[in-house]
Amino acid sequence: MSITLENEKILQETAAEWCRQNVSVDTLSEAEQLAMELGRKMSQAMLSAMAEQMDGKETYQGSGIECQCGSDARFVGYRGRWVRTLCGDIRVERAYCHCKECHKGVSPWDRIQGLTERIWSPGLKAFVAEMCARLTYAEVSKLLGRVLGIGIEESSQQEIVISMGSRLRAEESERVEGYFDRDEAIVSEETPHRLYVSMDAAKAHTGGAWHDIKAGVVFEGKRPAQGCERKTDELEKPRYIAAQETSEEFGRRLYLRALESGLEQAKQVVVIGDGAEWIWNEADMHFPKSIKILDYYHACEHVHGLARALYGEGNANGKRWAKMHCEKLKTDGSESLLRALKRRKPKTEEQREALRLEVGYFKRHRRRMNYPKYVANGMMIGSGPVEAACKVVVGQRLKQAGMRWSVAGAVAILAVRTAVLSGETERIQRLARAQ
């Protein structure tokens, strides 16, 4: 039910009148702190009162229910349990059944409410998981205590995150397997004009060593408003993924993300990445008809690196040479640079090897470097969104000073963090109720 405006006004006026008669404060800070404490007490009392309407005989589901082992669990009476909620701890009496086969207790009411044997309510679990996806466990402990007056140890936060992350990742894996192995359809209501897909990798310390964490982002390219100075697409509706897994597994997961973002309805698909071979293997596998763009700034890094090899570190002529060819990349594509490199006469074996490697690099990616055409069509030519994803998704949460993660802990926090950053808090709330 929803509270009426009239009842809300009565409740507010009653609380205000009580404060006028019973509370005396000297400063705004003192009043603010006291109001928060009273608000927590009031919330706890109201939640307890509302829970009373659901407990006792209201939880009775019959003389027997099916146990998880498949046998019948028989009703034996009403038993109480504590539940820690966003409003504080409450106690409820609910019907309790016992299974003679597996010797376990079962509460139908617990199942309906999405409760496990642990004390936390689904709402609290979802809130803690989202907080932990954004902040360190130590920071979450401080905020929960200061704002909500709730104490949850870091080990308990980690347990919640691992549970929630496992459910999120299991749901993702089920959808991937359903699509690729069982031909289950993925229906999306999104209709992007231009859909971008970008992927990269970052390092994180998991399982006792440094490992690659692959990150990806799928987003709609929004055209700038008419009259805007900006001429290229803007990032809209980003959806993130991140995982420590093989490129094949990651490619399937990224493709599913793209389907959910409207891949099949998109008029145009653009894949942007750096020079890593695994990126283009997955792009060719899952997005064969897409426009594939080598990150312009990554290409420029190779130009500057070659300039240092040919002219020496910090050489002014080398800097001018690199700047000129980076500008030509954007206006002419790769052909001008390749012609210049072909004419270049190396003076040392080191220069000869540097030229050989870079000529190979630019030839290998020449079909992904038609920057004049991309720019003319308003396309992004940089992988900034996925590089930002590596920093925001992986770096800011997994790579703070001294952080070391178990594989399970890293997998879970990445699953929750990508869901939060993709705007999927409702999904977290739903899975917090799952058994």
Image (cartoon, grey):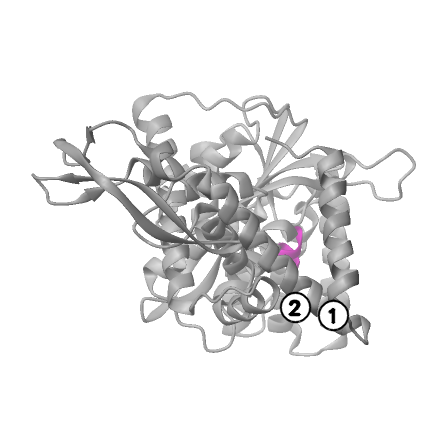
* Left or right: 179 in relation to 390: left
Tell me which secondary structure the magenta stretch mostly adopts. helix
Q: Is residue 215 visible?
A: no
The secondary structure type at the circle numbered 2 is helix
Under mark 1, the amino acid is Lys
Residue 29 vs residue 330, the one in the foreground: 29
Please tell me in which quadrant of the rendered image residue 218 appears.
top right
Say the numbered circle drawn on residue 319.
1
Q: Give the image quarter of residue 185.
A: top left
Q: Quadrant of the C terminus?
A: top left
Q: Is residue 185 above or below residue 124?
A: above
Q: Residues in magenta? A: 296-300
The percent coordinates of residue 340 (x first, y second) are 67, 55
What residue is at 30 percent from the left and 35 percent from the top? 108
Identify the secondary structure beneath mark 1. helix
Picture disc at residue 307: 2
Q: Is residue 88 left or right of residue 10?
A: left
Asked if disc 2 and disc 1 are in contact, CB closer than 8 Å, the reply is: yes
Q: Is residue 22 above or below residue 99?
A: below
Query: How many tags in the picture?
Result: 2
Q: Of the two numbered discs 2 and 1 on the same chain, state the one appearing first in sequence.
A: 2
Residue 60 seen from this side: yes
Q: Which residue appears at 51% of the width and 77% of the height?
A: 401
Q: Residue at x 75, y 51 (%)?
A: 328
Q: Position of residue 48 (x, y in %)?
A: 49, 48
In this view, the residue farthest toward the front is 21
- Residue 124 at x, y = what percent? 48, 52
Identify whether 364 is placed above or below 151: above
